[in-house]
Amino acid sequence: MDLGEQLPPTTHYVPADEAPPTGLVFRGNFHKTKVCDLNAGFFPAVPAFLIGQRSYVAALGVIEYMCDVPSFLAALRLYRAPVVLSYAAVDAPNSTTTTAVLRENSYTSLAFETLLSAAGFHVGGTSSIPVGGLNNKLYKLTPV
């Protein structure tokens, strides 16, 4: 699913994804996606007029591949916008699958939620979403 196609036509959507490890191939349609080395701190530029102006950030299926999650969350916090993100904690049901070997981090639910708080986010809601055999938790965050 292309998230951009689900948004209102007046939405300024900046699709970005982590550069894949060598040998991996992207799935789906990424012709509009900016491939960024998020682990090196390269985030997509957002026009200044959008910062804090009813903007939202989505980080779906990305946190598991971040080497330095606290720094990644701190960078998200700089957008000063609500964030929707997903994370498959290692203590979630069905968390051990073949994709788990590609992870860069292994936080429990409690440890991950502690990181969110330390980065300056309030968890406004959560829901579980099964994706590819993993039980991801979807978080709705607001900067505090």
Image: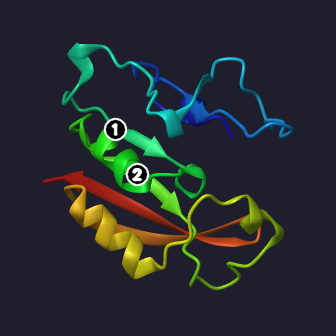
- Where 25 sits versus 84, above or below? above
- Where 96 sits versus 24, above or below? below
Query: Which of marks 2 and 1 precedes in the sequence?
Result: 1
What residue is shown at x 55% (from left), y 36% (from top)? 6
Residue 62 shown left or right of residue 72 in the figure: right
What residue does disc 1 label?
56
Q: Mark 1 near mark 2, Cβ–Cβ under 8 Å? A: yes
Looking at the image, can residue 36 be seen?
yes
The circle drawn on residue 84 is 2
Residue 47: x %, y % from top left: 31, 14
Quadrant of the image containing the C terminus: bottom left
What residue is shown at x 71% (from left), y 25% (from top)? 30
Q: Quadrant of residue 132?
A: bottom right
What residue is shown at x 39% (from left), y 76% (from top)? 111
Residue 137: x %, y % from top left: 51, 69
- Where 41 sits versus 86, above or below? above
* 71 and 33: which is toward the camera: 71
Kind of residue at disc 1: Tyr
